[in-house]
């Protein structure tokens, strides 16, 4: 299925329009946004006749349905194997990341694909092929990702997109902007605005500890940045004027009880997609495209953004979508920072990690050793294996673990031990790096400044 927000005309054509920036009239754009209510974030994918491998039985649910609910605030499924991502691609109208695209990435960049790409953890995209074309032609683009600071401690699920984004920045050598939506958390959570600002500052320290290059990375909180940079606020206003309340209700599920702050927020998350929102980095240029690595639940924000972009004379953001990092108790929901036993926090000690994995990590193994050896384990629902698939870089070792677990040779206890031994040094290293992040370090990353980066060498000039 093609991109659902493809367009043909515009009232404000860009001076530099790429193949992905087909233009449309205002009336056509409004119609397009309204048409996307059928693929809005209140997604309920119903799968008939699906196969559920719960408890290793692999029974076919001919008389049952599996319902997935995905929006930026809620992710749930009735299936023990988790969200049906093929259906998400189909309903959201994105494109799958296939072998051909991965091969092109390796050819264009000269780098081997990240294991998160090769294993389908990042599984869907919008216009990533256009980003590769920009890189191939030596044209600029930038990265944009973010974090909603609802808790003091980030968890492993939060770490995955940042690790991947750091790798992308190193491969492409491009600027990166990271948005902390402290305003969003004030609007959606039972938190005081002062507490949201404090949590954002704490989360910034965790993000810095991942190892981003301060010369190429700008981190900002919405409350601080909007009050300091009129260009960002002006883009917010332009976006807000393009989207009606009826369209926002259709896309985001707002109702008569939603506060007006929630209704206006999507424009704030959309604004960093446009390069002229960062005049200290890009000046007044509005034709520099951005690439957004994010979890698939954030896509509705950027479907709206992509539809609005041509009307503002800007480039549509490209996206790379990741699957959800599952909760310890099973793949039915994404991890929650508010439930300490659903996740491995980046502040957890070695002892806490061991206890959480041994006590709470859902097992796909047999009920008894005899049953496990006879029937093998189910990697599709085993959380320890799922975590290894996200975090273990060694493809051969992961394949061997899968083979021996599914054959019954490897017992659940040994699989959990393998995960614990991987997680403990990973989290410990992060804790130690975070201790070195001072308030002065935070100021360096959040200061308004020109970033230092090199454009890619042109291989095929336009």
Image (spheres, rainbow, N blue to C red):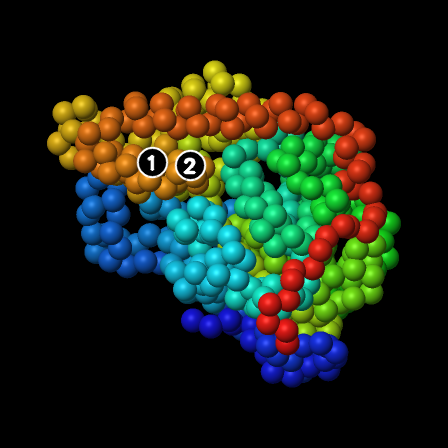
| x, y percent for residue 122 | 47, 52
Q: Nearer the viewer, mark 1 or mark 2?
A: 1
- Foreground residue among 20 and 312: 20
Name the residue at 24% across, 38% down. Answer: 403
| x, y percent for residue 276 | 78, 62
| x, y percent for residue 210 | 62, 35
Name the residue at 68% across, 36% down. Answer: 208
Q: Which element carries disc 1, helix, strand or loop?
A: helix
**Residue at numbered disc 2:** 392
Name the residue at 30% across, 40% down. Answer: 399
- The numbered dot on residue 397 is 1
Q: Quadrant of residue 420?
A: top left
Assign the N terminus to one quadrant of the image. Answer: bottom left
Q: Which element carries disc 2, helix, strand or loop?
A: loop
Q: Is residue 383 visible?
A: no
Q: Is residue 208 visible?
A: yes
- For the view shown, which residue lies furthest in the top direction? 351
- The numbered dot on residue 189 is none
| x, y percent for residue 198 | 74, 32
Name the residue at 49% across, 31% down. Answer: 343
- Foreground residue among 6 and 252: 6
The answer to whether marks 1 and 2 mark residues whose Cβ atoms lie closer than 8 Å is yes
- Near mark 1 (Cα within 10 A), the count class, few <14, some 14-19 or many ≥20, is few
Q: CA distance from mark 1 to mark 2?
A: 8 Å
Whether 315 is drawn above or below 430: the answer is below
């Amino acid at each position: 299925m093609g991109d659902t927000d493809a367009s043909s005309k515009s009232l404000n054509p860009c001076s530099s329009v790429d193949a992905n920036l087909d233009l449309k009239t205002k009336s056509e754009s409004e119609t397009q946004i309204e048409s996307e209510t059928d693929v809005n974030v209140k997604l309920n994918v119903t799968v008939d006749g699906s196969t559920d491998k719960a408890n290793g039985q692999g029974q076919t649910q001919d008389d049952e349905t599996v319902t997935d609910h995905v929006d930026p605030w809620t992710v749930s499924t009735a299936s023990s194997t988790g969200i049906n991502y093929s259906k998400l691609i189909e309903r959201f109208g994105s494109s799958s990341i296939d072998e051909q695209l991965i091969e092109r990435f390796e050819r264009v960049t000269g780098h081997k694909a990240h294991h998160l790409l090769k294993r389908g953890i990042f599984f869907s995209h919008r216009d990533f092929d256009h980003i590769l074309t920009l890189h191939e032609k030596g044209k600029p683009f930038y990265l944009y990702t973010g974090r909603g600071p609802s808790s003091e401690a980030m968890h492993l699920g939060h770490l995955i997109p940042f690790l991947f984004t750091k790798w992308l920045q190193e491969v492409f050598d491009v600027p990166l902007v990271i948005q902390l939506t402290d305003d969003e958390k004030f609007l959606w959570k039972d938190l005081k605005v002062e507490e949201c600002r404090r949590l954002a500052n704490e989360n910034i320290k965790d993000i810095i500890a991942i190892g981003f290059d301060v010369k190429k990375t700008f981190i900002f909180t919405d409350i601080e940045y909007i009050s300091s940079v009129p260009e960002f606020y002006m883009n917010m206003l332009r976006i807000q004027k393009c989207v009606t309340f009826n369209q926002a209700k259709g896309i985001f599920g707002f109702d008569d009880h939603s506060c007006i702050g929630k209704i206006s927020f999507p424009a704030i998350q959309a604004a960093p997609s446009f390069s002229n929102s960062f005049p200290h980095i890009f000046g007044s240029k509005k034709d520099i495209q951005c690439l957004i690595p994010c979890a698939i639940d954030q896509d509705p924000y950027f479907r709206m953004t992509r539809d609005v972009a041509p009307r503002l004379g800007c480039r549509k953001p490209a996206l790379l979508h990741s699957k959800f990092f599952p909760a310890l108790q099973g793949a039915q929901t994404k991890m929650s920072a508010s439930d300490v036993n659903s996740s491995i926090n980046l502040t957890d000690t070695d002892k806490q990690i061991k206890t959480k994995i041994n006590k709470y990590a859902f097992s796909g193994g047999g009920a008894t050793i005899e049953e496990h050896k006879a029937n093998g384990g189910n990697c599709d629902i085993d959380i320890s294996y799922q975590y290894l698939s996200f975090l273990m870089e060694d493809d051969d070792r992961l394949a061997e673990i899968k083979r021996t677990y599914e054959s019954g040779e490897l017992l659940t206890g040994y699989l959990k031990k393998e995960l614990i031994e991987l997680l403990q040094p990973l989290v410990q290293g992060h804790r130690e790096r975070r201790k070195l992040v001072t308030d002065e370090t935070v100021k360096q990353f959040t200061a308004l400044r020109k970033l230092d980066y090199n454009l890619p060498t042109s291989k095929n000039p336009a």
